[in-house]
Amino acid sequence: MHRRALLRRLGAVGLVAIAGCGEYESGPQTPPGDTTDQAQTETTTTPEDVFVVPEFAFEEGTDGDAVLVATVENTRDDPQQGEMVVRYADDGTTKSVTESIDLQGKDETTVRVKLPIAYADRNLQGIDFETAT
């Protein structure tokens, strides 16, 4: 009988200890009055978010080169112009190919970018955008 009482006390102490740690960690990260929604709104309205790529894939071109097929969306209400810069690795160095983008507000398109590397050797380093101001 003493074992059960001891186990119950240890279990209660463990729950109190876990609850205390959880409150301490989340308190300083989210001070009273602040919301994470406000921070997310601020980061989604930056100029870099004019064009976004929700999905992309690679295809093998007719000559064996890699072709990046990407859906590009204009997140703004007004028409936007810019360039999509596709960075890739080739023999240990980073190279890039640039494709012009011209989209109406809240529109999307599929962009096909041929990379001058073999499909088997494709190594995407990133997709960036430079928009006209």
Image: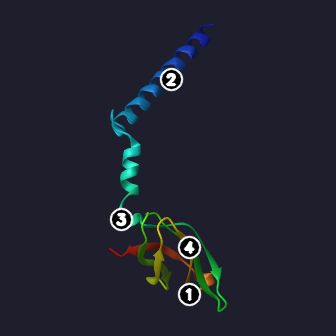
Q: Residue at x 47, y 72 (%)?
A: 126
As measured in the structure, the alpha-carbon distance from the residue carrying label 4 to the one carrying label 2 is 53 Å
Please tell me which of labels 1 and 3 falls first in the chain.
3
Q: Amino acid at mark 3?
A: Pro
Q: Are there few (<14), some (14-19), or many (20+) residues within 10 Å of tag 3? A: few
**Residue 117: assigned label:** 1
Residue 31 located left or right of residue 75: left
Q: Amino acid at mark 1?
A: Ile
Badge 1 element: strand
As measured in the structure, the alpha-carbon distance from the residue carrying label 4 to the one carrying label 1 is 24 Å
Q: Quadrant of residue 118?
A: bottom right
Observer-side mark, 3 or 2, equals 3
As measured in the structure, the alpha-carbon distance from the residue carrying label 3 to the one carrying label 4 is 20 Å
Badge 4 element: strand
Please tell me which of labels 3 and 2 falls first in the chain.
2
Q: Is residue 30 above or below residue 123?
A: above
Badge 2 element: helix
Q: Are there few (<14), some (14-19), or many (20+) residues within 10 Å of tag 1? A: some
Please tell me which of labels 3 and 4 falls first in the chain.
3
Please tell me which of labels 4 and 2 falls first in the chain.
2
Looking at the image, can residue 86 be seen? no
Q: Residue 76: x and y, percent? A: 43, 64
Q: Residue 99: x and y, percent? A: 47, 82
**Residue 93: assigned label:** none
Q: Amino acid at mark 4?
A: Thr
**Residue 15: assigned label:** 2
The residue pinned by badge 4 equals 109
